[in-house]
Amino acid sequence: MPIIPSPSLTVVGAINVDLTARVERAPGPGETVADGILQRGPGGKGANQAVAAARLGAAVRMVGAVGDDLDGRGVRAQFAAIGVDASGVQTADAATGTALIVVDATGENSIVVCAGANAEIDPTALGIHRGAAVLAQLEVSDAVISAAAEAAGFLALNVAPARPLPPGVLERCDLVIANETEYAQLPEVHDAALLCVTLGADGARLYRRGELVASAAGVATTVRNTVGAGDAFCAALVCGLLRGDEPEAALARACAVGAAAVADDASQPALDLLDTYGDPA
Ligand code: ADP
C-alpha cells in the first residue's frame, strides 16, 4: 500500500445550525404545508467542508465565527469531537448563523440563510498561516475572502452562493468550483486557472483555462438530501489535488464522495477516508 500523506487544509467560511423540515412537497408562495418533520443539525458551507475534509483524513483548521450562545458552544464541541482545529473560530457579537431548509420527498431543497455571526467575522484577525492551503466559499464578506486570498499559498474557492468576486481574488485562485447554476451566473470564472463544474447526478468536469482536462461520471445512488453533496465534493476534490492525485482520479473520487453525501440525511454526511472511495483508474 502506498503511504499517502494527509493534506493540511484551512477552511474559511460560514458556520450554521441547520433547521431542516422534511416535507412531501415544498410550499409555494403563501401556502402552508403541515406534514413537516423537523431535524436540527450542524451546517454552513464552511463548517460542512471542514468537517468533510477532516472525515476524509485531512488535518483541518476552521476560520469563521459563531455567537456567544448555545449553538456556538455546540458547534465548538462538535469540532473538538471530530478533530477540527477551531482556534480560528471567532466569537462574534451576533447569533450563531442559522439556515432554514425545506427538503421535499425527491430530495430537492430550498434554503433561507440567516447569516448572524458569519457576517461579523473580523477580516483582520483570521490568523491564517502564511502560505496555507485554503478552501473558501462565498457565504462570508468580501473583506474576509480577500484577506484569506491574500494569505493563502494555495486557494480553492467554491463560488457558492454565486455573486461577483471581490477584485483580485479570481487571479489568486488555484481552483474554482462551481455547480451548473453558478457556472452560468459567473462567466468571469470560465477562464480560471483550474475550474471544476459539478453536474449533479451527471458527475463533474475539470477545465484548465477553459480547456477540458478531465471528466468523471456521476455515481448512481439513492437521493436522500442534496444539501451537503457539493460541500463534501469540494472537500474531497481539494484533498485529492493537495495530496497529489492526478486530476482525473481526484475528480472521480470526489464524485464518489458526492454520491455518498446525497445518500445521507445529514448536511454533514458520515464519510470514510478518501482512499476508501476506490481506485477510479
Ligand atoms: P451542488 O450540490 O453544490 O448544487 P451538484 O448538484 O452539482 O452541486 O452536486 C455536487 C456533486 O455531488 C456532483 O458533482 C456529484 O458528484 C454529487 N451528486 C449530486 N447529486 C447527485 C446524485 N443525484 N447522484 C449522484 N451524485 C450526485
Image (cartoon, helix red, strand yellow):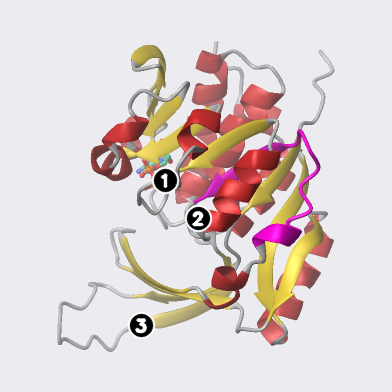
The answer to whether mark 3 and mark 2 are in CB contact below 8 A is no
Q: Which residue is mark 2?
A: 142
Q: Mark 1, residues whose alpha carbon is within 10 Å: few (<14), some, or many (≥20)?
A: some
Q: CA distance from mark 1 to mark 2?
A: 8 Å
In which quarter of the view is residue 186 placed?
top left
Residue at the spot x=73%, y=56% of the render?
126
Above or below residue 102? Residue 194 is above
Q: Which residues are magenta?
A: 123-137
Task: Tell me what residue is drawn at x 33 percent, y 27 percent.
Answer: 190
Mark 3 residue element: loop
Question: Residue 120 at what x, y percent from top left?
Answer: 60, 72
**Residue that badge 3 annotates:** 36
- Specify the quarter for ligand 1: top left
- Whether ligand 1 has any atom under 8 Å from the Cβ at mark 3 is answered as no
Q: Which residue is mark 1?
A: 165
- Which tag is nearer the camera, tag 3 or tag 1? 1
Point out the tag, 3 or 2, that comes first from the N-terminus. 3
- Quadrant including the N terminus: top right
Residue 148, disc? none
| Mark 1 residue element | loop
Q: Is residue 225 visible?
A: yes
Question: Quadrant location of residue 87?
Answer: bottom right
21 vs 235, left or right, is left
What amino acid does circle 3 point to?
Gly
Q: Amino acid at mark 1?
A: Leu
Nearer the N terminus, badge 1 or badge 2? 2
* Quadrant occupied by the C terminus: top right
Count of number-bearing discs = 3
Q: Amino acid at mark 2?
A: Asp
